Image (tube, grey):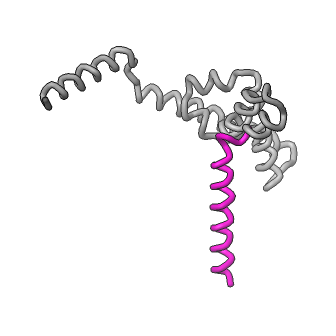
Amino acid sequence: MTGSRAHYNRNYINYVNAFDPPTSHFKNCLRAFFVGGFICTIGQFFRYMLGFAGLEGDMLAGTVSVLLIFLGTLLTGLGVYDRIGKNAGAGSIVPITGFANSVASPAIEFKTEGYVYGMAAKMFVVAGPIIVFGVSAGAAVGLIYWLLDL
């Protein structure tokens, strides 16, 4: 019985592989690297231009972050960011624009269910756990620093 079971498993794997296109890991990593790098280059461009305009320090960093979040949300609303993500994979998810996309996409998708039960309730379905973990980790690290400073 075990010999025939192995035969069926092998046949099933061959059947699945016939429909599953081969994955080019090197090509995917290269795309992610270049798209993520391009997004970061845009952020660096914003940083240089705003620094040249006179912003500095925390104001500069915050403004660049807000601009990248706005750009990610705008491209999500126009349907462009999904096409970028389909081709770039993790290169479009890792930068802050990917976080903006993960908040804006469910909001757009569930808007038809209403503003409260649709858009507002579903907006943080993907990004909610990330926000909770980030705030909790930040509070824990802050508490540790505070205790070490006593």
Look at 75% across and 38% down and name the residue there. Answer: 69
- Tell which of 113 and 40 is nearer to you: 113
Q: Quadrant of residue 94?
A: top right
Q: Quadrant of residue 8?
A: top left
Q: Position of residue 118 (x, y in %)?
A: 77, 33
- Which quadrant holds the C terminus? bottom right
Indicate left or right for 112 with 125 as reference: right
Q: Position of residue 99 (x, y in %)?
A: 67, 40
Span highlighted in magenta in the image? 123-150
Front in this rendered view, residue 13 or 29: 13
Residue positioned 76% across, 50% down in the render: 61
Residue nearest the observer in this picture, 72 or 20: 20
Q: Position of residue 67 (x, y in %)?
A: 79, 38
Residue at screen point 24% across, 26% down:
9
Tell me, yes or no, whether the highlighted magenta stretch contains residue 131: yes
Magenta portion: prevailing SS class: helix
User: Eyeballing the image, is 24 above or below 63?
Assistant: above
Residue at 83% from the left image edge and 52% from the top image edge: 59
